Amino acid sequence: MTDTVEPTTAPAGPGDDRGANEKAGEKAPEKERRGRFSLPQWWHKDHPVFGPLAGFYTGMLFVIVVPGLYGTLLKSVVGYQRTEELFPFVALTLLVPIGLLVPRRTRRFGRYMLFGCLATAVVVIGVAAVVLYLLITRDS
């Protein structure tokens, strides 16, 4: 004589974040439940906002951090003169966001990463041009 006892759960309260099917008395599928909170439907898919934002800010950081880090490491390894000769090769790092455009799975992230790179470059060059213009006109 084997009796199986169903686990009892407390009734859903105001702070309980369970799915609607569990509140109605049905149990949610086990792979959708994690502890006492249920996961959103988009959890294992791409979120419509997270991908573009992550790509854009990755592109911003990529344009700012990679050339500085490349120059610093190169200067510490080969010296200042040789670093000036090799620094233009940092442009090859733009192959990373371009390479992300090829596979279908990373294409959206790559587009926004490239957009972040280009937008950051335009802003930096635009601000530098305005500052240079102001410095030259005030000097005269």
Image (spheres, helix red, strand yellow):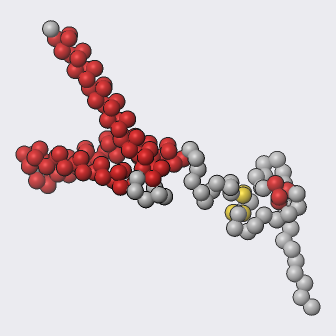
Is 37 displayed left or right of 14 in the figure? left
- Which residue is farthest top? 140
Could you tell me residue 100's position as x and y percent?
A: 39, 54
Which quadrant holds residue 39? bottom right
Could you tell me residue 136's position as x and y percent?
A: 18, 15
> Relative to the observer, which residue lies in front, 94 or 1?
94
Could you tell me residue 27's position as x and y percent?
A: 82, 65
Q: Give the quadrant of the N terminus.
A: bottom right
Is 52 displayed left or right of 79 in the figure? right
Residue at image position (44%, 44%) is: 112
- Which residue is farthest left? 81
Residue at image position (31%, 41%) is: 64
Evaluate whether residue 17 shows in this view: yes
| In the image, residue 125 above or below residue 26 | above
Which quadrant holds residue 30? bottom right
Residue at image position (24%, 15%) is: 134
| In the image, residue 125 above or below residue 61 | above
Could you tell me residue 52's position as x and y percent?
A: 50, 45
Is 129 displayed left or right of 111 in the figure? left
Please give the count of numbered marks on the rendered protein: 0
- Which residue is farthest right? 1
Q: Give the quadrant of the C terminus.
A: top left
Which quadrant holds residue 119? top left
Residue at image position (57%, 53%) is: 46
Evaluate whether residue 61 shows in this view: no
